Amino acid sequence: MKPDELSDLDWGKGDGLLPAIVQHARTGALLMLGYMNQRALHTTLDGGRVTFFSRSRNVLWIKGETSGNFLEVVAVSADCDGDTILVQALPAGPVCHTGLATCFPEALKSDAEKLAFLGQLERVIAQRIAGQPDGSYTARLHAEGPRRMAQKVGEEGVELALAAATGDDAEVLVEAADLLYHVTLLLRQRGLSLAAVVEELELRHARLAASVPGQVSPA
């Protein structure tokens, strides 16, 4: 959304205020709900930090102005009716005044939220490679080059297969985690990402769905 699009929203429906849902830009988690008038939305778009209108105090307030836990704006959009705002943001700390990460702590986590740690894993791997901290297994393995990383992926794949054939569920999970970590590191070395792998799976699914009506599996 751009500042010149504010007038297209339906400000009259809520007496000049629109509900603003804040969503974590990486995990998709629902963080909080606030209200914005045109000035608050303009300030949010212009300043890059989520700004609300306080209905109780009748003033604008920047989320995090007292705690330092700002919400850094990534994207802002409106719903189909133009009477609700979605703000996708990155929190600098706990969002809720209770110290929790969200104002909806009892909400069920979506599948996307549960898988969001994979994105964090990619970022941690990138930090280890860039920072080269002492004792970092990630940095050392990356420095050993692609052949060594490929070897580790092969080893971890065999260990997962053996665990699946003769081990229990706990062993399978441990070995699957090891394999996924090493695959993520190998992708990073090649300048690729898990998101690119997901895109490939989506393309396969789309091709199969087009060729076999009713088919839902990407395999």
Image (cartoon, grey):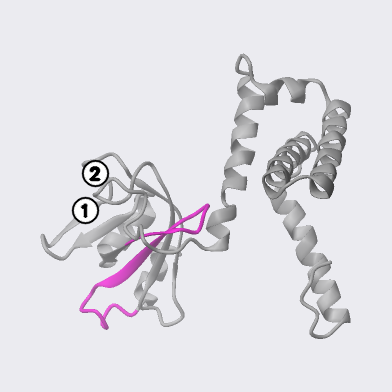
- Identify the residue position indicated by label 1 in the image: 61
Image quarter for residue 108?
bottom left
Callout 2 crowding tier (Cα within 10 Å): few <14, some 14–19, many ≥20: few
Q: Nearer the viewer, residue 149 or 132?
A: 149
Q: If the image is split into quadrants, where does the C terminus sit?
A: bottom right
Q: Nearer the viewer, residue 11 or 162?
A: 162
Q: Amino acid at mark 2?
A: Glu
Cα gap from disc 2 to disc 1, whole angstroms: 7 Å
- Quarter of the figure with the N terminus: bottom left
Q: Position of residue 42 (x, y in %)?
A: 32, 60
Residue hosting label 2: 65
SS for dot 2: loop
* Rendered residue at 77%/20% (across/down): 143
Estimate the x, y position of residue 59 in percent, counting from the top left: 15, 58
Q: Is residue 132 above or below residue 94?
A: above
The image quadrant that residue 212 belongs to is: bottom right
User: Mark 1 packing: few (<14 Cα in 10 Å), some, or many (20+)?
Assistant: some
The residue closer to the viewer here, 187 or 45, is 187
Q: Residue at x 49, y 54 (%)?
A: 25
**Amino acid on which the number 1 mark rests in the picture:** Trp
182 vs 168, nearest the viewer: 168
Residue 28, percent from left and from top: 50, 59
Look at the image and say whether residue 18 sits in the magenta stretch: yes
Q: Is residue 37 left or right of residue 118?
A: left
Task: Report the side of 41 relative to 161 (left or right).
Answer: left
Question: Residue 104, image x and y in percent?
Answer: 34, 60
Which residue is found at the position 81% from the left and 78% from the top? 209
Mark 2 and mark 1 in contact? Answer it, CB < 8 Å. yes
34 lies left or right of 142: left
Relative vertical location of residue 217 with respect to residue 112 in this rendering, above or below: below
Q: Which residues are magenta?
A: 10-32
